[in-house]
Image (spheres, helix red, strand yellow):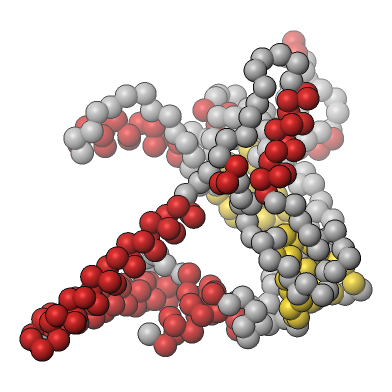
Amino acid sequence: MILYGATGFLFNHPTAFSDAPFVSFGASEIRDTPMESLPAPSAIAEQVVQALNERAKEGKPYALVEPEKVKYTRDFAFATVKVDDREVSVLFDVTNPGGTVRSRPAPVAAKVEEKAPFAIGSAKGGATKGGGNRGGGGGGGRGERPAPKGGEKSDAPAAAAPMTGPLALPDPMHERVKAAVPVVLERTGFQGGEVKVSSVPDLSFLMSDGTKTWRVSYNAMEGTVSGASTDAAPPADELSTRRFLTRLHLTHGFPGGQNAKWFWAVIVDAMAFVMVFWGVSGIFMWWQLKATRKLGFVVLLFSVGVATALGLGMHDVLSPR
């Protein structure tokens, strides 16, 4: 309970026990700057609608609907400044005059990434989507070039050109998934239909070419292979005490094996049970004390009303617009 309470407090107060120097500022620091007086969100929305109407050449004019509901999607605006070996982050509150300034060591820039000589296609569209479903595919030895049209062999060395075409392997995972879905649906009582595999996990592994070690990623659906030298990987960010506690607070779910995270998930379930048990058992204990039933009933009704109103309000805040 103490750990959950402390880590929850850290989330609610981002500047508490900060692992980086920071200061808060208010209206005096932004006086005589463009951030001193921001226009109302509804006024900006009116400008957007007016600009769209000026661009539109045909059709009915656009009109702003429910201007009182116009709002920013976030409460803050951010900016960063690089100063020598440090990175200064400035946060502006767009609803109230003020914000914070935080300084931390600048992240170490990664080395220029060397293009992997065995790369095939690109995860951003270099290969045809779903290319793993297709036959053919390039990919035998390193740097292999497809044979020229007409069946003639090329005299150029094999390593002179990168691989082309998706790399298809026999019985890839997405084909296995596609074949298994109808059987699973039938056995679980759901209606079948056309199956479209959305995604399967990429395969990540280390590979050596005798000179350096590569971190390789293979996408079976796309038939793409990408890689980066392990020498170019940036150093991992230091896990500060504050970051560790906040990440610990967010950790949830049972992993595949029984490790420390699995036992932490057991703790999460135990906490959920204990908190619910405390609430239910407290109501039961209150009911046993006849002298406090009337007052307790009033408090209980008030609590239910406040909790319901707060829940509906938060639902409205968190709902997509």
Against 30, is 175 above or below? above
Against 92, is 157 above or below? above
Residue 118 location (% of width, % of height): 72, 42
Q: Quadrant of residue 141?
A: top right
Side (left or right) of 111 relative to 56: right
Residue 3 location (% of width, % of height): 44, 85
Q: Which residue is located at x 32 percent, y 62 percent?
A: 308
Q: Which residue is located at x 81 percent, y 23 percent?
A: 154
Q: Nearer the viewer, residue 31 or 161?
A: 31
Q: Nearer the viewer, residue 254 or 302?
A: 302
Report whether residue 270 is seen.
Answer: no
Side (left or right) of 64 relative to 80: left
Side (left or right) of 66 relative to 23: left
Q: Which residue is located at x 77 percent, y 44 percent?
A: 117
Q: Which residue is located at x 50 percent, y 46 percent?
A: 320
Q: Nearer the viewer, residue 9 or 296?
A: 296
